[in-house]
Image: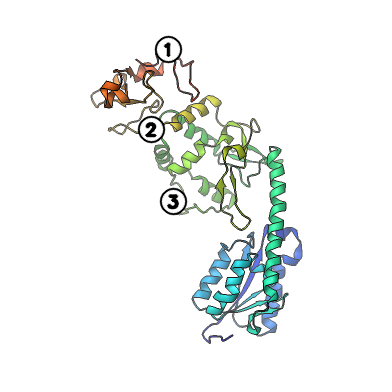
Amino acid sequence: MELRSNQTMTALYCRLSQEDELAGESNSIHNQKQILQEYADRNGFQNPRFFVDVGYSGVTFDRPAYLEMMAEVEAGQVSTIIVKDHSRLGRNRLVVGILLEETFAQYHVRYIAVNDGVDTINGIDDSIAVRDLFNEWHARDTSKKVKAVIMAAARRGERIGTSAPYGYKKDEGNPRHLVPNEETAPVVARIFELCAGGLGPDKIARILTQEQILTPTAYAYRTRGVRHSALNLDRPYAWSGSTVAGILEHEEYIGNTINCRTYTPSFKNKKSLLNPPDKILRFEGTHEPLIDLDTWEIVQRVRRGKRRPTKMGQQDMLSGLVYCTDCGSRHYLCRCGSWDENQYTFVCGRYHNHKADCTPHTIKAAALRQIDCTQRDPAGICRGEGALG
């Protein structure tokens, strides 16, 4: 292989997955560094620089240190990449094959796997393809075993999430059990109260931002050092409507454990997809709730209805929940600047737009709030006597 003289860096790449940590000291980062440094010194490789990924599977190549190293490769700053053994580079035979056959050759990078005797300056032996296949099989077999253990715990009703939902923390005596977080549980309760009072996620997000309450990702980083892809350290109080909406949809806040919301389609593809409802496992009363059931049901009914503010930017707590008993269409809130709250009125939407299709049903918003709704349809909508005028 022809080497370019202006390449000056020797990249010493180390990778340790969670499964490798269980295997013992042989694959530890300390041991990998020691082997690579000694090899580089013994063979006269100049300007060595370590690139280290900890906690990353070999089947994914979305690893910070690996991406940083490849950026240096593409910039022409790397002459040689050295790894302890070939599986440290990766366990996806298709990607590794492209790296060896195309990418490294394109950028004139020499690749060495110390313990496997691989050195591309001597050419690429056919046995490397076989080795890549076995490395991938190992990753697939490990993935199956880990998934089987996780699914067994999920079916027993044990929480399988790696972190506690915002508002909770892990029980020190039992990490699989949730207990309220005294700092964030009141924030969750307030979010539900605001929504039940008629505010949408975007409005709630603006209130939390104005009050400078740390976002869930910023809180996790400041208290536990946990980084999330959505973390923005420059805007630690910038709540979004989607974050609020996500909190409002989680049953954990009424004391339930929900397992298997998502799945990964392949051990090579770590992107999560939503499971169909029949695949989701639900266990009730597994931990202390933060929200009472009545508030939860009110919020879910509110969230199911499309809620739009009036032209004056106002939104009533019952918006999206009032329906006509004759035609079944949704009632809309009518108000104007000269009215007081006792004059706010819900009007049948179908009659308002097409008067021939229904009759002029209306009801005062204040009167509607006083109705004792003891009759509800399967969707949870009030159909009680006198509910609509």
Residue 321 drawn at (x, y percent)? 41, 25
Residue 163 appears left or right of 173: left
Residue 86 drawn at (x, y percent)? 68, 71
Numbered circle sitting on residue 307: 2
Label 3: which secondary element: loop
Displayed quadrant of residue 341: top left
Query: At 53% from the left edge and 75% from the top edge, which residue is drawn?
Result: 73
Displayed quadrant of residue 160: top right
CA–CA distance between discs 2 and 1? Answer: 24 Å
Foreground pick, 100 / 196 = 100
In this rendering, the answer to whether 361 lies above or below 20 is above
Amino acid type of disc 3?
Arg
Residue 144 appears left or right of 374: right
Please indicate, yes or no, whether residue 121 appears anywhere in the rendered image: yes
Numbered label tally: 3
Displayed quadrant of residue 307: top left
The disc, 3 or 1, on the residue closer to the chain's N-terminal end is: 3
User: Residue beneath label 1, please?
Assistant: 385
Quadrant where the C terminus is found in the figure: top left
Amino acid type of disc 1?
Glu
Numbered circle sitting on residue 235: 3
Instruction: Mark 3: give few (<14), some (14-19) or many (20+) Cα within 10 Å.
Output: few
Give the farthest residue toward the front.
356
